């Protein structure tokens, strides 16, 4: 009998929730989250990586207690926990969604309603995103609402959804990797932090986020993609971090209503841009006080790419952390 993938994922989930994986060493990793002094280190996998790998959605274990997520960083490791060279396995992107909350910028219906709140995204740049001290994203450690539990999944076990696209860059070479997700965390029974809302800004929002550029698109070899979002509430952004693919130059977010510049996340290229345009970093920012907006303001996101060659399946995503006015501290 063929076992649906979600069921298989759940079996894995249940069998490994209590397992404690080793850090790097000779012991093979198993899926799950281990407590650290700074929060939790979660390993997700093994994920089979091939040259034709596609986007996949997995049901994955969560931090096993209620509390506040305060920072995020993701990378790839092998089955023994050692970092994987990004030329061997290419992390196009990975993101996590919390089905217990609604996403602010993509509510709609269908898949995106099912996914829930997209709270962190990363890719080749491995950007760490944090929020200022005293703030955090609240996780209740409860099972999802019943209408968001996929068929075959235990309705009583809390879970997150992890969407990933990880490819082997060497023809014919397949390997197994784990996503290692480091999450700064404060348990709810230790402290009460002020809650922030993750804000997913995306020039191709509510889709697979990808678009294609052709050589020469744009002005003088630079293409600019613009996306506007009307803020449904007043408050301030306390953090931003960008995600671009190879060839990306920068992501810029402005308050188009007031003209206030909010943040520019710049792409870094460790070996210089040419000939490979091998992206290695994206800048991120967090601080308090943050960048204020008023309900009804237009937040404008712009993604800039080099078009000295064709660029297939690129993205322009800025993650923000937002503090609504009504829950700001006095
Ligand atoms: Cu991407």
Image (cartoon, grey):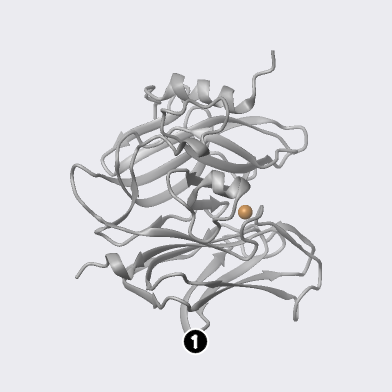
What residue is at 56 percent from the left and 51 percent from the top?
123
- Residue in the image at 53% along x and 30% along y: 45
**x and y percent of residue 209 in the render?**
65, 56
Viewer-side residue, 327 vs 169: 327
Regarding ligand 1, which quadrant of the image does it lie in?
bottom right
The answer to whether 39 appears left or right of 48 in the picture is left
Q: Nearer the viewer, residue 36 or 26?
A: 36
What is the x, y in percent for residue 127? 48, 56
Look at the picture and state if 327 lies above or below 226.
Answer: above
Viewed as shown, does residue 327 lie left or right of 122?
A: left
Q: Which residue lies furthest to the front in this view?
A: 147
**Residue at screen point 64% across, 24% down:** 4
Farthest-out residue, bottom? 259
The residue carrying mark 1 is 259
Decide: is 321 above or below 3: below
Percent position (x, y) of residue 231? Answer: 47, 72
Mark 1 crowdedness (10 Å alpha carbons): few <14, some 14-19, many ≥20: few
Q: Which of 231 and 134 is in front in this view?
A: 231
Q: Is mark 1 on a helix, strand or loop?
A: loop
């Amino acid at each position: 009998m063929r076992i649906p993938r979600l069921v298989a994922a759940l079996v894995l989930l249940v069998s490994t929730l209590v397992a404690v994986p080793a850090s790097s060493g000779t012991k093979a990793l198993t899926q799950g989250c281990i407590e650290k002094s700074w929060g939790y280190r979660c390993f997700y996998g093994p994920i089979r990586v091939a040259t034709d790998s596609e986007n996949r959605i997995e049901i994955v274990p969560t931090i096993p207690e209620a509390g506040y997520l305060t920072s995020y960083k993701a990378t790839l490791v092998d089955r023994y926990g050692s970092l994987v060279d990004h030329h061997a396995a290419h992390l196009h992107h990975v993101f996590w969604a919390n089905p217990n909350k609604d996403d602010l910028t993509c509510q709609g219906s269908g898949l995106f309603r099912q996914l829930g709140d997209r709270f962190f995204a990363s890719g080749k740049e491995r950007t760490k995103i944090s929020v200022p001290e005293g703030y955090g994203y609240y996780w209740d450690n409860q099972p999802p609402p019943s209408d968001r539990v996929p068929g075959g999944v235990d309705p009583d076990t809390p879970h997150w959804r992890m969407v990933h696209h990880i490819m082997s860059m060497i023809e014919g070479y397949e390997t197994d990797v784990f996503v290692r997700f480091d999450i700064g965390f404060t348990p709810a029974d230790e402290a009460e932090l002020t809650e922030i809302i993750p804000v997913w800004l995306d020039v191709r929002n509510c889709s697979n986020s990808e678009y294609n550029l052709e050589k020469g698109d744009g002005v003088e070899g630079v293409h600019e993609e613009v996306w506007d979002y009307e803020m449904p509430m007043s408050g301030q952004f306390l953090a931003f971090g960008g995600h671009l693919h190879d060839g990306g130059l920068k992501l810029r977010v402005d308050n188009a209503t007031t003209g206030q510049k909010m943040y520019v996340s710049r792409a870094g290229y460790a070996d210089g841009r040419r000939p490979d345009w091998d992206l290695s970093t994206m800048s991120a920012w967090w601080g308090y006080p943050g960048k204020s907006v008023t309900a009804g303001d237009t937040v404008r996101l712009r993604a800039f790419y080099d078009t000295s060659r064709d660029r297939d399946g690129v993205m322009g995503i800025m993650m923000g952390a937002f503090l609504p006015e009504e829950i700001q501290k006095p």
